[in-house]
Image (cartoon, rainbow, N blue to C red):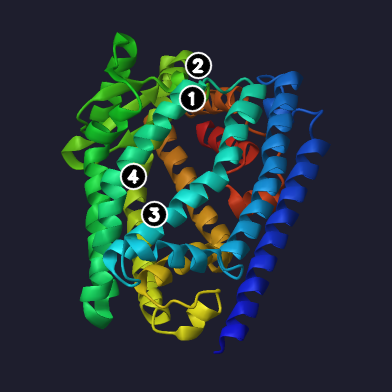
Amino acid sequence: MSSSEFSMIFVAALALTVMVRFWLAVRQISHVRNHRDAVPPAFAERIDRSAHQRAADYTVARVRFGLVDLLVSAGWLLLLTLGGVLQAIHDGLGVLGAPGSISHGTAFLAAVAVLGWLIDLPFTLYRTFGIEARFGFNRMTFGLLVSDTLKEALLAALVGIPVIAAVLWLMTRMGAMWWLHVWGFWLLFNLLVLLIWPTFIAPLFNKFAPLENPELRQRVESLLTRCGFRVSGLFVMDGSRRSAHGNAYFTGFGASKRIVFFDTLLEKLAPSEIEAVLAHELGHFRHRHVWKRLAVMSLMSLLLLALLGWLATQPWFFAGLGMSSIDMASALALFALTMPVFMFPLGPLMSFWSRVHEYEADAYASRQTSAGDLVSALVKLYRDNASTLTPDPVYSRFYDSHPPAALRVARLQAQASP
């Protein structure tokens, strides 16, 4: 393949991806607007018209702003590659080491990451202090944002830079099969992060206190006993410092597993509803969804690294994406930037698989607790988080990791029926 042919393939794939995503967004905006004034019958008794309209407006605002982000991101990708910005960064960092060296490659990849963060920063600020604030969800202060940013930057420097250097060392020293060594290193690194995240990293950004509510604690411990689960602790996180959205999650694995409740979730739901939500999360563990996803992602990463191993030897791959320099850092940067464009068609498959897992977790929860309590909890969360009850069906199938509200509630109600 010639470099010009690959350039045309890349531009065509990017254009097609942007057009499809734009079309899906327009469909979502139109569908949500058209159903803005009528609450679906299944929710009419629990969600009033004003809350439904607020959810519609919130959804439209986010999707509409996403269109701006989409166009800017596509333009930035073209500038980086065919526009020559990547090559200019590569050349400009020559003072930090010879091109192809680990020091130069690490600086190059770090610079690309920082530039990407700077491009995305205005969008992050507007989402947080614009859209989220307008709809009453943002509780992040500017000072807290600066604090989070400094901590993230320090963490990225202390962890990210050594990881990049290690990957580049493996790519340059392990011969033609370097990608297999990088894959093994990447798996070990991710498992280490899963192990240390709950106790060392997460507390840098949030406060975690033991769950004190005796009634809720008794319910949760009884549920864990029934389901045969052991955890290292039950914690409440101060999620309200940043957002009014509520959530709960498991984190860690093995002996370090812990359950974390957002304080905002505890404020909104009754103990029986929280128990049902937790039973849903336990369903994911019972069906080994986390491990299944890790297995699939590990296999995909192996295949992608093998593909990168081949592309790194093809001059047309570099030239076709605007790079005259041929080295491992350049190959890694180009691959990371452009692969999402070519992987875009797989999105609906991953979304479908995730929705299947959600239905399985719901079914498990309805066997361990009350399906009615889970329905009640979900409806409150839909209302309080301003989740649209009327997504466009095509948009939902393409993007949504969770089933649409109406379908999910209807299935749970059927499971609750004798």
Residue 382 image position (x, y, % from top left) = 59, 28
Which residue is label 4 attached to?
Answer: 156
Label 3 vs 4, first from the N-terminus: 3
Q: Quadrant of residue 122?
A: top right
* Quadrant of the frame with the N terminus: bottom right
Position of 77 relative to 290 (above/below): below
Query: What's the residue at 28%, 62% (across, down)?
Result: 103
Q: Residues within 10 Å of mark 3 (few under 14, many from 20)?
A: some
Label 1 vs 3, first from the N-terminus: 3
Mark 1: amino acid: Gly
Which residue is label 3 attached to?
Answer: 110
In front: 346, or 274? 346
Which residue is label 1 attached to?
Answer: 246
Q: Is residue 20 left or right of residue 113?
A: right
Q: Are marks 2 and 1 in contact (CB under 8 Å)?
A: yes
Instruction: Give the alpha-carbon distance from disc 3 to disc 4, as whole Å.
Output: 9 Å
Query: What's the residue at 65%, 47% (across, down)?
Result: 69
Q: Are marks 1 and 3 in contact (CB under 8 Å)?
A: no
In front: 169, or 192? 169
Residue 201 image position (x, y, % from top left) = 28, 35
Q: Dot 4: what SS?
A: helix
